[in-house]
Image: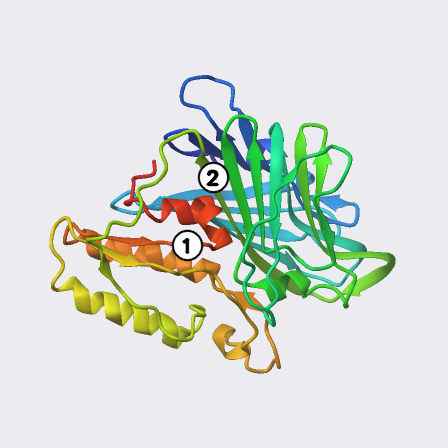
């Protein structure tokens, strides 16, 4: 039986998963009042291993799961490239009100000889006006500002052997698109020896192309049977609509743990315990707030369960997203809500995902 085409949509956007027609993911923005989207984000070509490409993959599964309260939708896809060692590509897309989280698992069943390995390369079709790139060094303080640059078709946005943390794009039709690497920074560098990975954001004919080459080498390398699992996030917002509400002065403030990395199980437990303790007293219409929260970069291997490593680079943006969603689902039982905001001068104030964390949960269809 052929996997069915799945669509997930909400006000102002529509996403499609159609493996039969070689569309693992396509997001169309600005679809409310016209049949033509004003910006499109696509996984294309997705995975490539040397000459093998996901565009030749055979679909196996495309399955949706929606939460009972419609606050989250999950789409799981599975396909195989029926050549060579027959690589298997599995993805999970989690649509939450403020962010889309993507987890990609590439399994190479046999020994593979190649000079390139590319995962989740993508195209953004839009009239880009300006962009900003965020990089975080775990040994340095968090960046204090975003450097916005006018877009030019003649120069790359980013080209490095280190994966970017975030790229923000503004187009001429008031869309802001945010692309983040997930918590697992170390995994993006797993496939290759030092200096042989490459991460590129470059102009294309219709907008921007983003390439994530875990291996890029003039010499052929041998990759043993392996599984590569990486994650990333996507968020978007309309800049011509009213700004999300500011944090009200009547909000009940919850304090952050001293060690800010929320990828630490102990720190997550502290925050969850704090929120649970307030849940019994929460009342309809109350607002709980966590001000001053922003992602941090960390190398403590115990936070990722990689105790056999001396350092394991990660950042806690995924857990910040997850905590906001979890906290709101808990408080919604009492008619209350949780809002979170970055520090006043933090660059994350300009991120769509953080701007939307000042808003209540909405349903996704």
| Vertical order, 181 against 185 (above or below) | above
Q: In the rendered structure, which disc, 1 or 2, sits on the residue that comes first in sequence?
A: 2
x, y percentage for residue 135? 62, 57
> Is residue 30 in view from this perspective?
yes
Give the SS element for disc 2. Answer: strand
Quarter of the image with the C terminus in it: top left
| Vertical order, 156 against 27 (above or below) | below
The quadrant where residue 113 appears: bottom right
Most distant residue in the top direction: 34
Q: In this view, does 207 lie to the left or right of 173?
A: right
Residue closest to the eye, 143 or 254? 143
x, y percentage for residue 237? 44, 37
Measuring 50% from the left and 44% from the top, which residue is drawn there? 61
x, y percentage for residue 169? 57, 39
Residue closest to the eye, 50 or 173? 173
Mark 2 — residue? 236
> Is residue 73 in view from this perspective?
no
Mark 1 — residue? 344
Q: Say if mark 1 contacts mark 2, CB within 8 Å.
A: no
């Amino acid at each position: 039986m052929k996997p069915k085409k799945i669509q997930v949509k909400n006000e102002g956007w529509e996403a499609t998963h159609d493996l039969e027609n070689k569309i693992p993911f396509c997001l169309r923005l600005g679809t409310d009042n016209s049949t033509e989207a004003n910006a499109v984000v696509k996984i294309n070509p997705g995975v490539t291993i040397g000459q093998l490409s996901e565009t030749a993959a055979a679909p196996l599964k495309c399955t949706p799961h929606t939460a009972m309260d419609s606050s989250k939708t999950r789409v799981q896809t599975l396909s195989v490239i029926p050549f060579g060692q027959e690589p298997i590509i599995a993805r999970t897309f989690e649509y939450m009100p403020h962010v889309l989280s993507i987890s990609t698992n590439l399994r190479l069943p046999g020994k593979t000889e190649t000079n390139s390995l590319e995962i989740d390369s993508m195209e953004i079709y839009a009239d880009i006006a300006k962009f900003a790139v965020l990089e975080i060094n775990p040994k340095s303080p968090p960046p204090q500002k975003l450097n916005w640059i006018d877009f030019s078709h003649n120069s790359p946005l980013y080209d490095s052997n280190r994966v970017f943390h975030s790229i923000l794009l503004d187009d001429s039709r008031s869309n802001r698109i945010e692309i983040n690497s997930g918590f697992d920074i170390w995994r993006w560098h797993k496939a290759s020896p030092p200096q042989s990975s490459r991460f590129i954001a470059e102009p294309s004919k219709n907008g921007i192309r983003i390439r994530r080459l875990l291996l890029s080498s003039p010499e052929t390398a041998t990759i043993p049977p392996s599984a590569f699992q990486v994650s990333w996030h996507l968020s978007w917002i309309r800049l011509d609509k009213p700004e999300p509400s500011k944090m009200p002065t009547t909000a009940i403030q919850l304090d952050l743990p001293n060690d800010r990395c929320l990828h630490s199980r102990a720190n997550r437990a502290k925050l969850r315990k704090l929120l649970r303790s307030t849940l019994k007293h929460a009342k309809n219409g109350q607002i709980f707030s966590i001000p001053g929260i922003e992602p941090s970069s960390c190398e403590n291997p115990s936070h990722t369960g990689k105790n056999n490593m001396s350092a394991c680079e990660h950042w806690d943006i995924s857990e910040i997203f997850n905590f906001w969603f979890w906290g709101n689902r808990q408080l919604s039982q009492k008619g209350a809500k949780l809002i979170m905001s970055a520090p006043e001068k933090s660059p994350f104030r300009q991120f769509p995902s953080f701007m939307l964390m000042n808003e209540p949960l909405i349903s996704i269809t």
